[in-house]
Amino acid sequence: MSDDVQKVILQLPASAEYVDIVRLNLYGIASKMGFTYEDIEDMKVAVSEACNNSVLYAYGQKDGVVDVIFEVEESSLSITVKDEGESFDGLDKSNERMTLHDKELSDVQVGGLGFYLMQALMDDVSVVSEAGKGTVVTLKKHLNFSEEKV
Amino acid sequence: MNTHKSNKFHAKTETKGNVCTVFLSGELDLSVASDFRLVMEPLVGDTKLDLVINLKELKYIDSTGIGILLSILKSRQGMDVKFMVEDVPPQIQKLFDMTGISKFFASQENSH
């Protein structure tokens, strides 16, 4: 493979029924690159959470699209999930690593775990959200050659 | 979308004595969250039953699925009745540990 970044681009309806298509494509690309089973499972969860956010919050009742761009580099895979809907409300708050670890069950709020999972499961996460222009989530995972491959 | 899905979500309920076990298979994500809620709704409020979810054949869960388990934990705790998960696959256990939901399941097991 050359030094250039090679791209695979998917455009899907912003609907929950298509998120599994993103996982299937991710599996194909990541296993071909030599990622371990565990890394692929981690990426599946992170990418699905990014797509869920676009599906749930970007377009309200309107139809919209989600672009998923896989950027294959020699030693890493970057996945960008992009929508052009309303920006995700309360993004800054969810960046405060919301987990259940220090909470009692009675104090727990359901929801908000998605962003935490993306950050915990990927090497790099960037979220850029601009009012009225949509949200771009970029997730990156480095290839670790020392482990067993799928 | 009516395409064939090998990872299609399915829930099967089995009641033996006072224990109700729900066997989940396939992928539990946002697209099937409402189906899963519908299956669980009548069971969650039944205080005569111990409720168990078997995850042996579950291939994938997202934060929506974990969120539903969390709300079941909350309702069952509120009624002081049992709710447990069993046969949790390693990749799902990892997510339970990461998010912190594991400790609530663990405390259910210890309290009875």
Image: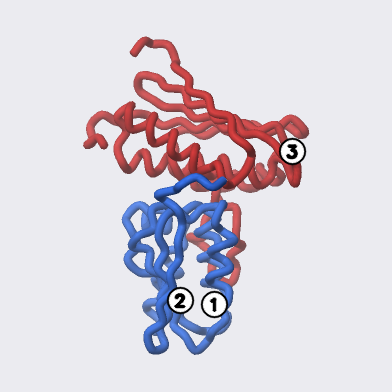
Residue B10 location, quadrant: bottom left
Marks 1 and 3 sit apart, C-alpha to C-alpha, by: 35 Å
Mark 3: give few (<14), some (14-19) or many (20+) Cα within 10 Å. Answer: some
SS under mark 3: loop
Pointers 1 and 2 in contact (C-beta within 8 Å)? yes
Marks 2 and 3 sit apart, C-alpha to C-alpha, by: 38 Å
The figure's colour scheme reads by chain
Per the rendering, the mark at residue A130 is: none
Taking the view exactly as shown, the residue that stands out farthest to the right is A132
Residue A84 visible here? yes
Q: Position of residue A137 (x, y in %)?
A: 58, 33
Q: Earlier in the sequence, mark 1 or mark 2?
A: 1
- Examine the rendered structure and indicate whether residue B41 appears above or below residue A114: below
State the residue in front, A52 or B1: B1
Mark 1 belongs to which subunit? B
Q: Residue at x 48, y 56 (%)?
A: B28
The kind of residue tagged 1 is: Val
Q: Colour of chain A?
A: red
Q: Quadrant of the C terminus of chain B?
A: bottom left
- Examine the rendered structure and indicate whether residue A63 appears above or below residue B7: above
Say which residue label 1 marks: B44
Say which residue label 2 marks: B83
Pointers 2 and 3 in contact (C-beta within 8 Å)? no
Mark 3 belongs to which subunit? A
Q: Position of residue A141 (x, y in %)?
A: 41, 32
Mark 1: give few (<14), some (14-19) or many (20+) Cα within 10 Å. Answer: many
